[in-house]
Image: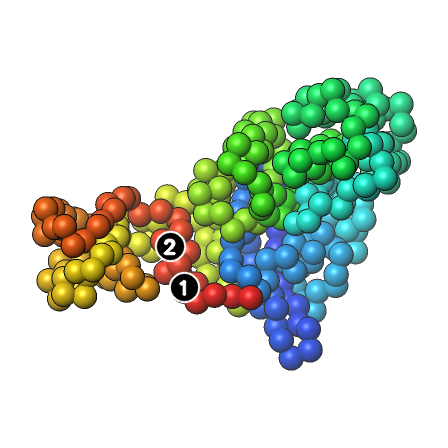
Amino acid sequence: MSSDALEVRGLRKHYGALEVVAGVEFAVRAGECFGLLGPNGAGKTTTLKLCLGLIEPDAGEMRLLGEPVPSRAREARTRVGVVPQFDSLDPDFSVAENLVVYASYFGIAERVIRARMSELLEFSALAGREDARLSTLSGGMKRRLTLARALVNDPELLFMDEPTTGLDPQARHLIWERLRRLTQRGKTIILTTHFMDEAERLCSRIAIMDRGRIIALGSPRELIARHIEPQVVEVHGPGLESWIPRAAPLAPRKEHVGETLFCYAADPEPLLAQLRGRTDLTYIHRPANLEDVFLKLTGRDLRD
């Protein structure tokens, strides 16, 4: 029996003439945090809906927690939690009532969920807020309540679609810490996010998706080592145009984006030596990161 929490092979989905998911294949190991990244319109959310059996595929095979999808998707979903991209909490209910009503969809009795209420609220940093109305909660609190709601059935696997979008840094860091706790407990997490630092911090492996296809797969470190030079120097300032010809032989790859020149190199010292002491240029020297990989593979053009 496979130890994978999710297996996807040859997955395809069309909407009219547009192929939104084009032969996607990947597997998510039990107990890992797996990131599915891509620009808007890459097919991420459609892929998640297919994996949950919420929409029918045109082709492909999927197994979710050992169950074939979509034929036994309903049975698999009883062991799954979902944090959607947008909160869908009931504004007419209190914090506790939102959890009780959601638990009833899984056939969980009110006395059972109320016995776990303090544990769920403590985990989501909402202790003492049982009777609070949603109108009194901040955006971060609502997002944490959505996370608590996804845990009412003690799921083996969590699908999280952009869980920290719109949150301030404090709220983001709190949710990161809670997600790490879940993986330490053996839970499996499938995460989509537009925050590359979030994926780099949380995910053991990442698939980058674009135009319906997976174009890269590996750990954050593997992807950085495989696809990008290790050092980056970002340069801008009024003297940039005149300095660019001098930079050309010193960096094997460069990108001129707006007012900034991105120089990628294994050895940045020759570049830095030319930049030191110049008053007409400002620069940042940093190691390459997952965002550099993402932009190299998917481009810098805006996607709407």
Residue 79 in picture, x, y percent from top left: 75, 39
Position of the N terminus by quadrant: top right
Pick whichever, 286 or 157, lies toward us: 286
Which residue is found at the position 37% from the left and 54% from the top? 293
Which residue is found at the position 21% from the left and 50% from the top? 282
Relative to 217, say whether 99 is above or below.
above
Comes first in the chain, label 2 or label 1: 2
Residue 198 in picture, x, y percent from top left: 49, 42
Callout 1: helix, strand or loop? loop
Which mark is on residue 300?
1
Pick whichever, 9 or 211, lies toward us: 211
Asked which quadrant contains residue 180, the reply is top right
Asked which quadrant contains residue 3, the reply is top right
Q: Residue furthest bottom?
A: 17
Tell me the kind of residue under disc 2.
Val
Q: Is residue 211 left or right of residue 243?
A: right
Q: Is residue 176 visible?
A: no
Number of numbered labels in the structure image: 2
Q: Is residue 211 left or right of residue 292?
A: right
Which residue is found at the position 32% from the left and 63% from the top? 257
Q: Is residue 296 left or right of residue 267?
A: right
Position of the C terminus by quadrant: bottom right
Characterize the local packing of mark 1: few (<14), some (14-19) or many (20 or more) Cα atoms within 10 angstroms: few
Q: Which residue is mark 2?
A: 293
Q: Is residue 130 left or right of residue 169?
A: right
Pick whichever, 100 or 230, lies toward us: 100
Asked which quadrant contains residue 296, the reply is bottom left
Characterize the local packing of mark 2: few (<14), some (14-19) or many (20 or more) Cα atoms within 10 angstroms: many
Callout 2: helix, strand or loop? helix
Tell me the kind of residue under disc 1.
Arg
